[in-house]
Image (cartoon, rainbow, N blue to C red):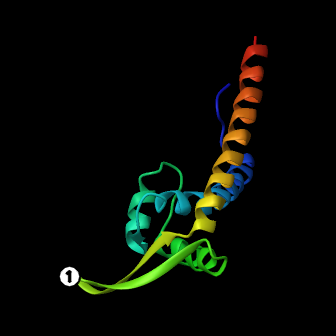
Amino acid sequence: MLYSPGVSDHFYDNWVTQVRKGLLELSVLGAIRARRLYGYDIVKTLRVTDGLVISEGTVYPILSRLRREGLVEAAIEPSPDGPARRYYALTPAGAQALRRMADHWERIKRAIDSTMQKDRDLAP
C-alpha cells in the first residue's frame, strides 16, 4: 500500500510527538546511567537517536523534573572550557526507576512487535 499524504498527516505527527514525549524521560535516565553528564552532553548523546528530536529546551525541564522527583542529582563543577557546568547522575531511586521503566518498555515493545507480526502473517 502506498502512503498518500493528507488528513492523516496531522494524526501521524501528533502520534509521533506523543510517543517521543513518553520516551524522553526514559532516554534521559538511560543516557546518564553509566556516567555523570552535563546537560548539553545529554542532548548530544540523545540527538543520535533517530526520531527522538531533543534539544536543550527539552532536556533541561526534564532534568529539573527528574531532580525534583529525586531520580537524579546535580553537582556544579568548574569547566576548563568556560563557565561551571551542572553534572547530572542517577540516584539509587533513579537507577531503580530506570530499571522499572526499561522493563515496562521492553514488555510493551514485545507485545507491539508480536501484534505487528500477527498482522504481517495475516496479510495476503
User: Residue at (73%, 41%) from the top-left corner?
Assistant: 108
Horizontal arrangement in the rendering, residue 104 relative to residue 80 (left or right): right
Quarter of the C terminus within the rendering: top right
| Residue visible at 40% across and 59% down in the picture | 45
Please determine whether, in this image, residue 50 is positioned above or below residue 86. Answer: above
Q: Is residue 97 left or right of residue 90?
A: right
Q: Residue at x 68, y 53 (%)?
A: 100
Q: Eyeballing the image, is 120 above or below 83?
A: above
Q: Nearer the viewer, residue 70 or 53?
A: 70
The image shows residue 16 at horizontal and vertical percentages of 65, 52
Name the amino acid, label 1.
Answer: Pro
Name the outermost residue toward the top.
Answer: 124
Task: Identify which residue, 27 or 78, lies in the foreground.
Answer: 78
Residue 25 position by quadrant: bottom right
Residue 34 found in image quarter: bottom left
Q: Specify the quadrant that holds the N terminus.
A: top right
Element under disc 1: loop
Q: Which residue is located at x 47 percent, y 50 percent? A: 49
